[in-house]
């Protein structure tokens, strides 16, 4: 005969532990557009993670993706980290605890620094806070220019008028020469 012990009082045992850890990832994607955009050029992008006050975080978080050999493989909370990314590259920072905020900032490539338009950022989370399984940031750089084809349509009607006048003059002179012969 076996009895099942029943725990009562402050030492009561439970089969369930309510311990949850919510973490997500941050994906940073680079897109280059425009007829003059260089899709092989690497752009410097600085990512800074900021933790919540009073919370303890891991020493660092793993980084995957990207095609530049010198990109760091880890990032630390509170330490700005620079990555080099080009068109089509995706850098992913994994296992970020919920509540961590982030900033993503690209170096200036406008004007004499490259001639690109100001970088356009598209955030999946306007708060820039890890609070879902995956947050994404897309950085778009555009560099377009009008290509000189050698034909100026502004002067086309005047050029046509000049051609018609020249043909008219040629026919008039040809008719006079033909009449003399």
Image (cartoon, grey):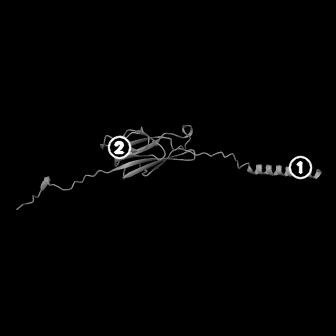
Identify the residue at image location x=42%, y=42%. 47
- The Cα atoms of the two marked residues, 2 and 1, are separated by 84 Å
In this orientation, does residue 129 appear?
A: no
Total number of numbered labels? 2
Q: Give the image location of residue 2, x and y in percent.
A: 6, 60
Indicate left or right for 72 with 139 as reference. Answer: left
Indicate left or right for 56 with 157 as reference. Answer: left
Residue occupied by mark 1: 173
Label 1 crowd (10 A; few <14 / some 14-19 / many >=20): few
Residue occupied by mark 2: 62
Which residue ends up furthest to the front in the rendered image? 181
Cβ–Cβ below 8 Å for labels 2 and 1?
Answer: no
State the quadrant of the N terminus. bottom left
Q: Give the image location of residue 18, x and y in percent.
A: 24, 54
Identify the residue at image location x=48%, y=43%. 86
Which of the two marks, 2 or 1, is nearer to us in this view? 1
- Secondary structure at badge 2 equals strand
Which residue ends up furthest to the bottom in the rendered image? 1
Q: Quadrant of residue 82?
A: top left
In this orientation, does residue 162 appear?
A: yes
First in sequence: mark 2 or mark 1?
2
Q: Nearer the viewer, residue 160 or 45?
A: 160
Q: Nearer the viewer, residue 181 or 140?
A: 181
Q: Give the image location of residue 103, x and y in percent.
A: 42, 44
Identify the residue at image location x=44%, y=48%. 137
- Secondary structure at badge 1 equals helix
Identify the residue at image location x=86%, y=52%. 171
């Amino acid at each position: 005969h076996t009895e099942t012990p029943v725990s009562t009082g402050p030492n009561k045992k439970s089969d369930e532990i309510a311990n949850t850890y919510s973490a997500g990832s941050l994906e940073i994607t680079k897109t280059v557009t425009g007829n003059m955009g260089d899709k092989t050029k690497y752009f410097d992008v600085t990512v800074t993670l900021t933790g919540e006050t009073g919370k303890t975080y891991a020493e660092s978080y793993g980084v995957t993706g990207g095609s530049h050999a010198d990109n760091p493989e880890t990032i630390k909370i509170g330490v700005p980290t620079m990555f080099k990314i080009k068109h089509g590259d995706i850098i992913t920072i994994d296992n970020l605890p919920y509540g961590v905020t982030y900033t993503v900032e690209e170096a200036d490539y406008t004007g004499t620094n490259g001639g690109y338009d100001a970088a356009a950022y598209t955030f999946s989370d306007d708060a820039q806070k890890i609070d879902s399984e995956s947050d994404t940031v897309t950085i778009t750089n555009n560099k377009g220019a009008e290509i000189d084809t050698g034909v100026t349509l502004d002067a086309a009607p005047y050029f046509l008028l000049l051609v018609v006048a020249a043909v008219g003059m040629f026919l008039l002179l040809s008719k006079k020469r033909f009449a003399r012969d």
